[in-house]
Image (tube, rainbow, N blue to C red):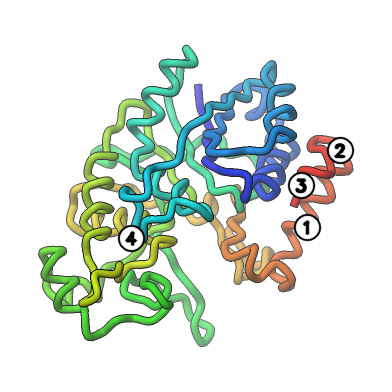
Amino acid sequence: MKCIVWLLDKGAEGMFANSLGSLKLNARRFWDENLKLILDFGLSDQMRSFLDTLRDELVYVRSLTLPKPHDVVGGDPGGGVGVMRTRVEISNILKTVVEALSLSVDDYLICDCDTAFITSPEPLPMPSAGGQISIMKEWDVSDGAEVEMKLCRSSSFVGGVVPWGYIPRISNQLGMSDQEFISVPTYNTGVFGFRAGAEFSNEWKNTYDLIKGIVDDKGLPIFSPFAAEQNAFSLCVFRGSITISELPRRFNQFPPRPPSSWPDGTVIAHFITFKKNQGEARYSLWYEIRDRVLLHGLIPVELVA
């Protein structure tokens, strides 16, 4: 059996409601036949009550605690940072949760809350032989051309500025040359798949902890806590300690490209930076899906962002 997993706290539950509703709306057969697992790091009572009504539809909720401040880059697990930090341990966590719930799972698909399902995710894109995770490289559009996004960019660092003066320190502590560090591509950890039994969390956590320990002359973190888990993953891939298969873009399609130019059979639309830029026209599809979810009565109106 397949299992789609969301990790969230109360701050993301409005977006999650739309993600969950879009799966039921646009992939009904998959919904009926497979598991939906929510890892709850502090949902509202209203959301928990609603999810409890879906137990007969193979929707499961497991409450987990946020990590301690000393385990998180920057020391504050609030604001979603603690949830993202917990994702580095996902293969270990799911093994424990699935056993506790007495579930049988073959394949997992991890999804951010700002994702919406356009059609069924069947068949799930699991890694090919030798790969541990199916995941997509990050990309952007610059001057009309697609560009591969790199770890060494402003959003990776505290203050939103690349600390060029600290690059030698960073690369030395990561055990690579300056040029290697600057060239590391990033992978979007908001959508990825893996088979039950895959073990990669120890490598991911160790690299996160390595990033956490890289500080400036005042002893303050250099890396942003909001990008640390994704950057840790990308470093693991670059070093070869986690092996991947390329996830087809149709399983993790970003705006800014309009839907008319998306790959045929797009499965998941990933509305990155939604909370910051939700008024932009590129997010109109999100609202169209939300309106259809509400029209069909799939999610209570007060729960949807």
Is disc 1 in contact with disc 3, using a CB cutoff of under 8 Å? no
Comparing 7 with 63, the one in front is: 63
Nearer the N terminus, badge 3 or badge 4?
Answer: 4
Is disc 3 in contact with disc 4, using a CB cutoff of under 8 Å? no
Of the residues tagged 4 and 2, which is closer to the observer? 4
Residue visible at 42% across and 77% down in the picture = 159
Comparing 264 with 160, the one in front is: 160
Q: CA distance from mark 2 to mark 1?
A: 14 Å
Q: CA distance from mark 3 to mark 4?
A: 30 Å
Residue visible at 46% across and 54% down in the picture = 81
Nearer the N terminus, badge 2 or badge 1?
Answer: 1
Of the residues tagged 1 and 4, which is closer to the observer? 4
177 w.r.t. 237: above or below = below
Nearer the N terminus, badge 1 or badge 3?
Answer: 1
Q: CA distance from mark 2 to mark 3?
A: 13 Å
Amino acid on which disc 2 is placed = His
Question: Which residue in the rendered view is the most extreme toward the right?
Answer: 295
Task: Give the residue pinned by disc 1.
Answer: 287
1 w.r.t. 209: above or below = above
Q: Position of residue 33 (x, y in %)?
A: 62, 21
Task: Give the residue pinned by disc 4.
Answer: 231
Residue 248 visible within the image = no
